[in-house]
Amino acid sequence: MVGQDMPNCRVMPVPDRTRAQVKLNDAMAALRLGQVARAERLLKGVLRTAPRHFDALMMLGALQGRQGRFDDAAMLFSRAVEARPVDADAHYNLGLALGQVETSDRPIACYRQALAINPRHLGAANNLAAELVARERWEEALRHLKPARAQHPDDPQLLCKSGIALKETGRFDEAVAALQQAVQKLPNDAGIHANLGLVLRNLGDLGVVTQFEI
């Protein structure tokens, strides 16, 4: 009112977590616009003030992974795991990054941990199967694939990996059944057709093989 002194107004400081969220939102908006460098700067800014900010670690790790900077991505996902050890996606992403830069069993351990936290994590199930098949650890792969397929009975990649492992352990009829199911789910996948053809060739069923040759 006229003639009355205004009360003293003091601007309250903005909490760091609010600033971090604003930068995080700006980074997401920048990514949607294709402004990768700006998004990276914003995320690094968040981590300078909040080094354990889980969402910023995950976003920056994913960004650097897409750029092929797998060592940096692995370091960021490792920090995300430390910040939130019960997050299945953090362990999964760490496994993906490590799988690009080393041949140790660390990616396998990451996928197993992701599945221990979330047994229905399809990405972890598929990548664990892929790692075991690539290393020709057939029996171990089959032990993993049995519960994985129970969780995801219609997933063609799990069916395909099962077919490969079953073939390599001499269980050709089961391998054919798994691969034929995979073909039904992904009829245009050349890799699945090729694997089915190999199994059928092992069975000596050459008349059927010609139907699946690519």
Image (tube, rainbow, N blue to C red):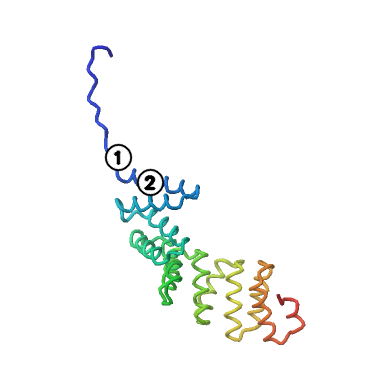
Residue 192: name its quadrant: bottom right
Label 2 crowd bin: few (<14), some (14–19), many (20+), radius 10 Å:
many
Label 1 crowd bin: few (<14), some (14–19), many (20+), radius 10 Å:
few
Residue 47, placed above or below residue 109: above
**Image spot of residue 132 (x, y percent):** 50, 77
Q: Quadrant of the C terminus?
A: bottom right
Q: Which mark is residue 84?
A: none
Asked whether, in this view, residue 97 is left or right of residue 149, the answer is: left
At a point 61% along the width and 68% down the height, the residue shown is 156
At a point 50% along the width and 70% down the height, the residue shown is 127
* Comes first in the chain, label 2 or label 1: 1
Q: Are marks 2 and 1 in contact (CB under 8 Å)?
A: no
Q: Say what amino acid the circle numbered 1 marks.
A: Val
At a point 44% along the width and 61% down the height, the residue shown is 89
Q: Which secondary structure, mark 1?
A: loop
Q: Residue furthest top?
A: 3
State the residue in front, 88 or 2: 2
Q: Which mark is residue 23?
A: 2
**Image spot of residue 115 (x, y percent):** 46, 67
At a point 67% along the width and 86% down the height, the residue shown is 202
**Image spot of residue 119 (x, y percent):** 48, 65
State the residue in front, 177 or 32: 32
How much space separates mark 2 and mark 1, taking CA atoms?
13 Å
Q: Which secondary structure, mark 2?
A: helix
Q: Quadrant of the N terminus?
A: top left
Label 1, on which residue?
A: 14
Q: Say what amino acid the circle numbered 2 marks.
A: Lys
Residue 4, placed above or below residue 76: above
State the residue in front, 197 or 35: 35
